[in-house]
């Protein structure tokens, strides 16, 4: 199997994981509402679970948006630049994304060392598992940045990046 095919499968898998996490977050919120209004019982763990699922969703969805070119941008000045300046700025952009991704992952690993001794109030999960979202999301973001950078540096682009 070609590398590009494997990377596309990884992309689809991450998208499915994000979808599953969103579904779990919605289900936990729905269960909280049903229990509170119909049974007059509040679930002690649902709000905390939703918060942690949201963290995982964000750190996995940012790379998805970046890969798809879905992040906001200001193109008025960019489009008026000559082609060489545009290409140079795009390469700098990819390098900055790579630096951001590596910084997120590296600093999160530092925080995880401390967080492994802390547990969440309701779920009893060690907090390093929550910060793992930043490490995995940062690693995935770095992988996408490298892919985009290689594509931008390749003279004959077969795949167009937005």
Image: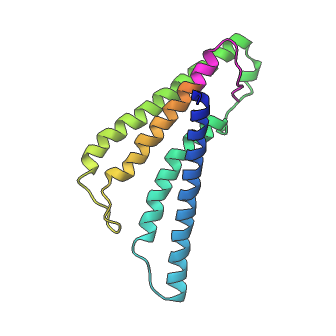
Image position of 62 with respect to 149: above or below: below
Residue at (36, 34) in percent of width and height: 106
- Residue 93 is at least partly visible in this image: no
Magenta stretch, overall SS: loop
Residue 133 vertical position relative to residue 83 in the rendered view, above or below: below
Residue 11 visible in rendering:
yes
Percent of width and height locating residue 73: 67, 34
Q: Residue 157: name its quadrant.
A: top right
Q: Residue furthest front?
A: 1
Furthest-left residue in this view:
117
Question: What is the x, y in percent for residue 42?
Answer: 44, 80
Side of 20 where 74 appears, left or right: right
Q: Residue at x 53, y 64 (%)?
A: 24
Q: Is residue 57 magenta?
A: no
Q: Whole-percent x and y of residue 129?
A: 35, 52
Q: Quadrant of residue 65?
A: top right
- Region of the chain picked out in magenta, as a range: 148-162
Q: Quadrant of the N terminus?
A: top right
Left or right: residue 76 versus residue 42 is right
Scheme by which the image is coloured: rainbow
- Left or right placement of residue 32 versus residue 130 in this view: right
Give coordinates of residue 107: x percent, y percent: 35, 37
């Amino acid at each position: 199997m070609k590398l590009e095919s494997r990377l596309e499968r990884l992309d689809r898998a991450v998208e499915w994981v994000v979808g599953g996490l969103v579904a779990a977050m919605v289900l936990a919120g729905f269960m909280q509402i049903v229990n509170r209004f119909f049974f007059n019982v509040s679930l002690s763990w649902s709000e905390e679970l939703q918060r942690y699922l949201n963290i995982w969703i964000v750190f996995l969805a940012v790379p998805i948006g970046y890969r798809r070119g879905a992040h906001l941008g200001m193109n008025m000045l960019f489009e008026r630049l000559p082609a060489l300046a545009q290409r140079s700025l795009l390469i700098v952009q990819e390098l900055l994304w790579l630096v951001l991704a590596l910084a997120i992952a590296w600093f999160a690993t530092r925080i995880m060392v401390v967080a492994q001794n802390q547990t969440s109030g309701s779920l009893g999960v060690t907090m390093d598992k929550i910060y793992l979202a930043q490490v995995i999301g940062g690693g995935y973001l770095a992988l996408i940045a490298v892919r985009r950078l290689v594509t931008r540096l390749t003279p004959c682009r077969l795949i167009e990046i937005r």
